[in-house]
Amino acid sequence: MSNPLLSVRDLHTTFDTDDGTVRAVDGVSFDVDAGETVCLVGESGSGKTVACESITKLIPTPPGEIAAGEVRFDGEDLTSLPDKQLTEYRGGRIGHVFQNPQGALDPVYTVGDQLVEAIRLHRDVPKSAARERAHSLLDRVGIGDVEDRIDDYPHQFSGGMKQRVVVAMALACDPDLLIADEPTTALDVTIQAQVLRLLDELQDERGMAMLFVTHDLGVVAEIADRVVVMYAGKVMETGDVYQVFENPSHPYTKALLECLPGRGRALETIGGTLPDPTDPPDGCRFHPRCPHAVPACEDGDQPAFEDVGGSHQASCVLYGADYDEPELAEANDD
Amino acid sequence: MPSTEQQSPLFTRIDWRDQSASLLDVRPRTAGLVLALAAVAVTFVYNHQVATTALVGTWDLRRMDWLLFVACILLVRYGVVPLVANWERSSGTVREFLRRPAGLLSLAWILGFAVLGLVGPELIGMPRVDFYADYQPPVFTTSHVTNIANVECVGPVTDAGCHGTWQYPLGTTSTGENVVNIVMYGAHIALKLSITAAMIMVVVATAVGTTAGYFGGWVDDVLMRYVDFQQTIPAIVVYIIVATMYLGKGLFTLALVFGLLNWGGIARLVRSETLERRESGYVRAARSAGASDLHVLRRHIIPNSAATVITAATRQIPLLILAQVLLAYLNLSDVRLRSLGEILNRALPPLGVGWWVVASITVFLVGTVLAFNVFGDTARDVLDPKEVA
Amino acid sequence: MTDDPLLAVRDLKKHYPVRSGLLRRVTGQVKAVDGISFEVREGETVGLVGESGCGKSTTATSVLRLEEPTAGDVYFEGDDITAYDDDEQKRFRRRAQMVFQDPNSAFDPRMTVGESVAEPLAIHGLRDDDRQAEIVSDILERVGLSADDADRYPHEFSGGQKQRIALARALILNPDLLVADEPVSALDVSVQAEILSLLDDLQSELGLSMLLISHDLGVVREVCDRVGVMYLGEMVEVAPTEELFANPQHPYTEALLASIPEPDPRSRGEAVELTGDVPDPSNPPSGCSFHTRCPRVVPPEDFEFPDGSFRQVLDFRLAAENGDVDTDALAGDTALREEFGLPSSLPDPDAESVLAAAISDAASGDVEAAADRLADAFPTVCERTDPELVDTEAGHPAACHLHDAASEHAPPELTNPQD
């Protein structure tokens, strides 16, 4: 087994606020193999965005701080790299696509200039060569008549087209890893389908790995190879996309799938609210809202990961040695 | 889920035919405002038609005082009453304000300034010329003022020169006026001017800003173009013209001209706040619940621009105070007897001798300007509800 | 009691003038809503779905007369609301309420939750503080909060709780109609589920009629009895919810349904992908406004086109018209055909000769000639005439030329567009 391309180990990212220290990411580990798509999925406040911004230290410091943990990218620990070297990775071997394409493009430069700049930041190539590459990238992401549009300003593009431009920028230096943070959330559903298709094709072509952050389980099912389910700064469940959707093991994952609207059956609700991020509960973060909680859930740390089949793991005491699984399995079939 | 499932909800049992909003349904504070303004109006008419020389005894009111009355009534109604009536809510804000050292200091200075300005001249009177006590240095200091012809030292004289005394803690001017009295009288003038001019600015700016922002369209265009135009007119020039040709070089003219010409910037801020709030959920919800424009403006739009208006107004006040001093210095503001500007004019070289006159006035002015600016900043930080959310 | 629906909208239009230049002269119209009709019956929930810019929110505000409609009628219990005088208008405001999308901006930050919820009571004349407090406590408990929450400030609540408070504020006047504009789209999915089930409970308890605006078909499916699908200011299909999902009649509805990513990794890649963006509403396409993206656009009758290939031909023509054909980069006929997904030859020789001629026009640089040639030779009914909303064989109305034949041959009594 070769080393994974990206390996996040026991990552802790904290934010100092007036109300106390928010442990946004509190001991998160996951891997992304070369060529693979991993989805970080969770609701707002789960820490998924902070986790992926911590990878290349994009979190604002202060108030944010990577308190502990290791982020290995191709063998190199990014958390210990000085900023100067880190910028080589950002936009170089690791590309970023953000949720809001509006904010990712500078309104006073043409998209062509921005692309050329992105390329020349990491590659020592003449302007003309960079522009040629910009041209072919825009063409590849589906901007029609590139010759005309390359000198347009961002506001002349629609939302979906802007996101295509942002994707082109992220691809500027042929990254090995693309980190996409809710890239389709701001888009209409028909446009979302186009962008998802595009990302999928690009990934196949380039053999690029993708870390995709989203709250939308539909999108996860559409694009993920593996899924990491997060809740309140902790990983609840990881596994192959088929395993997670067909045999959701952590009660939180189950609840999340149950409350998707529009499947023609009664809506289940989780009840309760997200724990206070400055003072999370002991034990399993989800236990105050969990329908299957037992006394053992309330103490100690987040339960250790238990294998529930293959590479599929859940952080739930019910899968530990002390418990049988039937009660959960029952809730599963309806 | 609700435990009172069987019982129909209370809100379904309201008989709306009983509820008629009547125009007579006025809140006490509104009634109070109308009454107070009416009282001022009646007294004004009485003073002008019947008792034309003095209102009560020797107390004669001048036009500046009338303006001040109206301003004070508005200040009480829209500043003090809401603060006290909703003490539960405002106490939090006040405490938050006092928690900050800068806020506490600036508030203390402003309160001191206000109290001094209000009661100082009444208690210890106006600065008086006294040629037996001219050029006296402040207490704890010495000066060789006795070298000047005809100057007697009130305190003991040693080799170091004339010693200051507690009789004149801040010393006296070349004509023997007590600097303490001068500063107090200066505070009095500054206070009068700040309250009236700031009130004029706040009222006009809020009215124009909210109207422009809320109604938009051509109303907005016309009002904002006017503001553009107005901001090109220097108030100081207008004041000189109006003061010398029509209204006289008094505080009244100063308050009126500066108040009526300097609200443009505040109105702009209020307008942009209004534009933002007009589209907000609570305004839309109120409108869809049937609220009139007046209700929306009074309940939501204007109260929510209060923080902006207060901050902006407190930034204007120091400018006004300095402008008055400047004009008095240039002999363009004739505030009966001694304004700080006029004293400065006399105290600075070539006429001046004692450094203490200039120093006292400067310290007072710098302190006051600083206090208002810091107060404005702190108020903005504390009042900005976005920070809380 | 009359048989009138609670709310009937007839041919509603809302156009916004586009102003430009120094004098701000009106230089165009954005037809945000362009002639839509629908009804909401008592106790019924009707959904309006569509993508951003389709006019669904404008419909909501126009229906409540928060914006003055440009044309058309809105009847509330049979009375025309545009003819209401002030008193009637105020009574209507009491009986029709609205909930907005963003719970975070929905409350005046200076007011306690209790004051915000009680505000509509005061607006309508109930000013007694004790009575207000009593009613507010009651309603807060009914939406799942506690009576003590009345004294707290909005920023102390989470998004979902705020949306509950917003619901309380909208329901406190005991309205007959609730218009909910994207009530859950700013919320997390688990919170969405809670709000949706609360809405459902309250609706059945109070006998409320509801107009729900949403871009999310899942949400619509969850709560609506009937659904209207909007595209560029027009209603393209209206159907009972389950029927719409099971048997969509308009290609846009089909595409919209197919674009929702299913939370099932096995059904991956089944989406029908729509080409292109939503057109600019200030300059909508002629005829059926969906024809520029429609995967089932009707080919001209005189030619034979294999499935879907007319879409590519039309895409090529539209690109040529917009100047989006990059003839420098795409030298040669084959490259052009490849770029636009055109087959190497069309089976119908007449059609092929037209296409081949157009492509060589384009390849030789004369893109306009290519566009004109294609437009002349391949006229499509979708571009010429705007389809009416007519009953389809499936039993519910849709506005699409694919159903022209059905309606022409159907017995006359069934062609009545309104049921």
Image: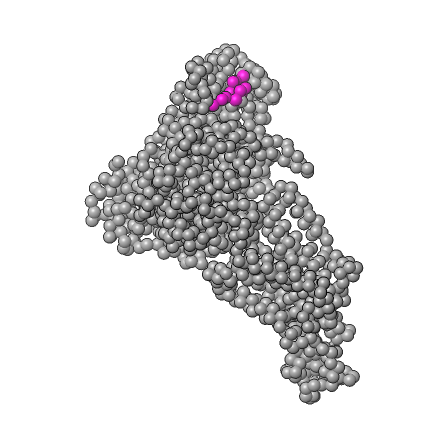
Membership of B347 in magenta stretch:
no
The scheme the figure's colours follow is one colour
Q: Position of residue C16 (x, y in %)?
A: 58, 34
Residue occupying the point 56% across, 69% down: B108
Residue occupying the point 71% across, 69% down: B54
Q: Nearer the viewer, residue A268 or C343?
A: A268
Q: Nearer the viewer, residue A84 or A188?
A: A188
| The magenta segment | C379-389
Q: Compared to A60, does A42 lie above or below?
A: above
Q: Nearer the viewer, residue A19 or A166?
A: A19
Residue occupying the point 57% across, 38% down: A155
| Residue B348 appears left or right of C288 | right
Residue occupying the point 20% across, 44% down: A324
Q: Position of residue C163 (x, y in %)?
A: 42, 45
Q: Compared to A56, does A240 lie above or below?
A: above
Using the rendered image of the protein, determine whether residue A221 is visible from the camera's viewpoint. Answer: no
Using the rendered image of the protein, determine whether residue A269 is visible from the camera's viewpoint. Answer: yes
Quadrant that contains the C terminus of chain C: top left
| Residue A316 appears left or right of B210 | left
Q: Position of residue C189 (x, y in %)?
A: 38, 41
Res. B366 image quadrant: bottom right
Q: Compared to C218, does B22 lie above or below?
A: below
* Magenta highlight: main SS: loop
| Residue B241 appears left or right of B307 | right
Quadrant that contains the N terminus of chain C: top left
Count all numbered tags in the image, as a single digit.
Answer: 0
Q: Position of residue C152 (x, y in %)?
A: 42, 55
